[in-house]
Image: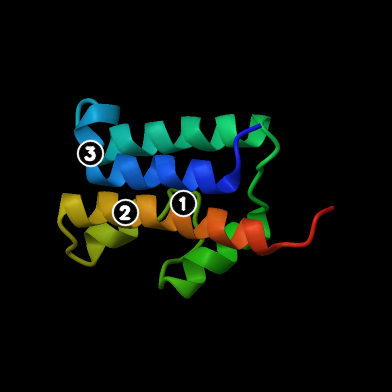
C-alpha cells in the first residue's frame, strides 16, 4: 500500500508538472484528475472524511459546496494557474491532516 507521504509527493509532482498529468491543461480536467486520484487513494485505504474536507476548505477560506471550491476561486478573480495550484494544495493539505488522525 502506498504511504500518505508517497501520495503527497505525487501531488507535489503534479503541481510542478501539471501538463505531464493533465490534458487538456485546464481546471475541469484537473478536477477530473483529482477525483480519480481521490478514488484511487480511497481504494488504497486513504479515504478523506467529509468533515475533514469541510474543515480544510473552511480553514483555507472556501465554502464546502457541491460545486467545489474552483467556482469560488474564479469568482474571487483568481487566474486559472492559481486555481489549479490551490486545488492541488488543498489535496496535499488533506493528506497531511489525514496522516495526523488517530487510526480507526
Q: Tell me residue 35's x, y (percent).
A: 47, 35
| Circle 2 residues within 10 Å: few <14, some 14–19, many ≥20 | some
Vertical side of 6 occupied by 98: above or below:
below
Q: Which mark is residue 6?
A: none
Residue behind mark 3: 17
The residues bearing labels 3 and 2 have C-alpha atoms spaced at a distance of 23 Å
- In the image, farthest residue toward the right: 104
Residue 22 appears in view:
no
Q: Tell me residue 70's x, y (percent).
A: 33, 52
Q: Which mark is residue 91?
A: 1
Q: Earlier in the sequence, mark 3 or mark 2?
A: 3
Residue behind mark 2: 71
Q: Locate the N terminus by quadrant.
A: top right
- In the image, farthest residue toward the top: 23
Residue plotted at (38% across, 56% down): 89
Image side of residue 64 versus residue 34, left or right: right
Q: Earlier in the sequence, mark 2 or mark 1?
A: 2
Amino acid at each position: 500500500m502506498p504511504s500518505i507521504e508517497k501520495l503527497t509527493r505525487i501531488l507535489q509532482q503534479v503541481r510542478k508538472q501539471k501538463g505531464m498529468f493533465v490534458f487538456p491543461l485546464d481546471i475541469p480536467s484537473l478536477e477530473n484528475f483529482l477525483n480519480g486520484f481521490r478514488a484511487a487513494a480511497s481504494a488504497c485505504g486513504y479515504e478523506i472524511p467529509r468533515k475533514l474536507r469541510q474543515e480544510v476548505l473552511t480553514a483555507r477560506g472556501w465554502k464546502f459546496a457541491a460545486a467545489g471550491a474552483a467556482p469560488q476561486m474564479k469568482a474571487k478573480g483568481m487566474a486559472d494557474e492559481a486555481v489549479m495550484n490551490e486545488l492541488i494544495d488543498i489535496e496535499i493539505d488533506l493528506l497531511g491532516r489525514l496522516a495526523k488522525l488517530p487510526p480507526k
